[in-house]
Amino acid sequence: MEQPVPIQLTSVLIVEDDSAMQARLRALMREVAGAEAWIGIAPDLASACQSLREQQPVLALVDVCLPDGSGIDLIQRMQQESPDTQAIIVSAFAEEETILAALRAGAIGYLLKDREDIELVLSLRSLQRGGAPIDPMIARRILGMVPAAAASPPVDAAQAPQLTGRELEILQWVAQGLSNRDIAARTSLSRLTIEGYTKNIYRKLAVRSRTAAVHEARSLGLLE
C-alpha cells in the first residue's frame, strides 16, 4: 500500500477576493504552517498567476468564484505556472458539478467556508500527514458516486494508452505524491525532462492534472 506523503507547508498562496475571508484564511494558515511560512494573497486570477510564477508556493487555497474568472480554471493553469503547487478549493459552493470539476482539474482537497475555524484547521493540518482535506459532506457525495463507477465495464487492455517504461516509472512516483523536483532527483534527470514526460503522460491519458492522471491510470489498470 502506498504511504501518504506529508507536505511541508513552507509557502502558501491564498486566492480569494473577499478581504474578511483573506484575513481569516491567513490566520488559519499561520496557525497551521507556523510563523516562518510565506503566506501570500491574490485577489484575482491575474495576480494569482503572477504569484505562482514568482513564488512557486507549496500550497494554494483557491476560491471558485473570482472577479476575473474561475478558480477551477486557475488550478488547470497551475500545470504551466507552478506544476509542483498543490491546490485546495475553499468555497461556499458545494454543487456536485463544481466539486467534480475541481477534482478533475487537479485539486487535492475541497473545503467549505461555512465550517468552524477549528474544523478547517484540522482539515488543513491533515496535509502535514499526507492527507487530502475533504469536507465530510463533500466526501459523502464522492462516496455516493463510487458504486456507479465500480459498475462501469472494464477497459480493454488493447485500447488502453501505451505508456513507455520511463513514463510508467514517473507515473508511479507521481502516484506517491512526489513533485517534479523530487522525481528528477530520484531518477537523475533534469526537472525540465520530468516535466516533458509528465506532459506526454497527460496527453496520452487525456487529462490535465496529476490527480486526474493517477485516477485515469488506475481505472485503466496501469497502476495498482
Image (spheres, rainbow, N blue to C red):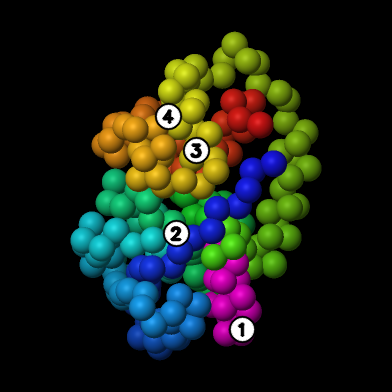
Structural distance between the alpha carbons of marks 3 and 1: 33 Å
1 or 2: tag closer to the N-terminus = 2
Which residue was labeled with disc 1?
118
Secondary structure at badge 4 equals: helix
Which residue was labeled with disc 3?
173
Vertical placement of 12 versus 56: above or below? below
Secondary structure at badge 3 equals: helix
CB of mark 1 within 8 Å of CB of mark 4?
A: no
Which residue was labeled with disc 4?
201
Res 30 → quadrant: bottom left
Q: Position of residue 38 (x, y in %)?
A: 32, 74
Badge 4: few (under 14), some or many (20 or more) residues near its Cα, within 10 Å? many
- Asked if residue 119 lies in the magenta stretch, the reply is yes
2 or 4: tag closer to the N-terminus = 2
Residue type at numbered disc 1: Ile
Structural distance between the alpha carbons of marks 3 and 2: 19 Å
Q: Position of residue 140 (x, y in %)?
A: 73, 60
Structural distance between the alpha carbons of marks 1 and 4: 39 Å
3 or 1: tag closer to the N-terminus = 1
Q: What residue is shown at x 40% (from left), y 45% (from top)?
A: 182
Badge 1: few (under 14), some or many (20 or more) residues near its Cα, within 10 Å? few
Most prominent secondary structure in the magenta stretch? helix
In the rendered image, the quadrant that contains the C terminus is top right
- Range drawn in magenta: 113-127
